[in-house]
Image (spheres, helix red, strand yellow):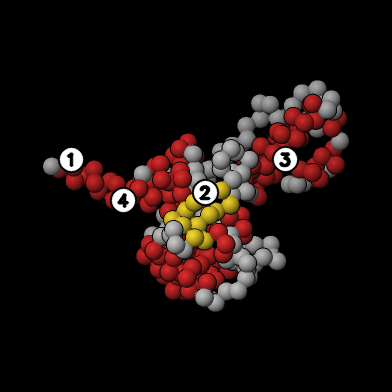
Amino acid sequence: MAVRCNFSSFIVEQSCGKITPDRLLEWKSLLLSRYTTASMAGYMKNVKAVLNWAVRQDCLAKNLMNGITRGNFRNKDKDRIITMEEYALLINACPNQEWRVIIALARIGGLRCPSELQQLRWKDVDWEQNRFLVHSPKTERHVNHATRLVPLFDELKAELQKHFLDNENEFVIYGYQKTDWNLSNPFQKVSDDAGLDKIACPFRNMRRSRSNEVVRRWGEAMEKLWIGHTADVMEKHYLCPLDVDFARVAVRNAE
């Protein structure tokens, strides 16, 4: 019987009594042939949770995922910094003001896309106090992490103000409210028009780029407040040394 990538289909096919470590390894190999290591690790994590539930329901005597490594969630090959020079090219290549705001919110505001962009409303923007309120579905289960306040950085404020003057909708990004929020293909069109090479994981890398800038300019405490990372997540998944960091070391060594 062919193994399917979708684990729910796999469970339906097998029934609990037919799930074996060998079948799980076969399924893992199929995932690796089709997805990145990071994506595969996510699937494996979910599978282990399902099997833990099956053990608690007495459907399985033990979790057959025990002893099967899930891999690393981080795929460093796709990590990159999107520079401010590239940001300017992207902004100039946008087809409309809404897309300029999408990229500004991701690259300058450091928002998660699509979850945090999707929920942003004009009532969340405090023009007088020069800040806006971000609702974060990803972290809302943690105490005091359902929302955070982010400054209206100059580059972001300029794009938001232009959009505000021509927007009578409740949501800041309204063009995608009734869609699946798949922004990868439209972004790639913008990137192509900007004359840039294909950017893998563009929204995650724009957020990573801003995270690094905030740490270097305002410190880790402000990164935690404005971008919304714990120190551990920031260190493991977002911070990366830049050429300027190595250059600074070289200058100090020469002194």
Amino acid type at circle 4 is: Asp
- CA distance separating discs 3 and 2: 40 Å
* SS state under label 1: helix
Amino acid type at circle 2 is: Arg
Q: Closest to the observer: 149 or 66? A: 149
Amino acid type at circle 3 is: Trp
Task: Return the x and y of residue 146 as percentages of the image width and height.
Answer: 59, 45
Residue 243 is labelled as 4
Q: Which residue is mark 2?
A: 148
Which circle, 4 or 3, is nearer the viewer? 4
* Mark 1 crowd level (few <14, some 14–19, many ≥20, 10 Å Cα): few
* SS state under label 3: helix
Q: Residue at x 52, y 75 (%)?
A: 165
**Quadrant in the picture for the C terminus:** top left
Any part of residue 162 in sight: yes
- CA distance separating discs 1 and 3: 52 Å
Which circle, 1 or 3, is nearer the viewer? 1
Q: Is residue 213 left or right of residue 238?
A: left
Q: Earlier in the sequence, mark 3 or mark 2?
A: 3
- CA distance separating discs 4 and 2: 31 Å
Going by the picture, which residue comes out furthest to the front?
128
* SS state under label 4: helix
Q: Closest to the observer: 168 or 109? A: 168
Q: Closest to the observer: 59 or 4? A: 59
Q: Which residue is mark 1?
A: 253
Q: Are marks 1 and 2 in contact (CB under 8 Å)?
A: no
Q: Is residue 146 left or right of residue 246?
A: right
Task: Determine which quarter of the picture holds residue 185.
Answer: bottom right
When the figure is inspected, residue 158 is found, relative to residue 206, above or below; the finding is: below
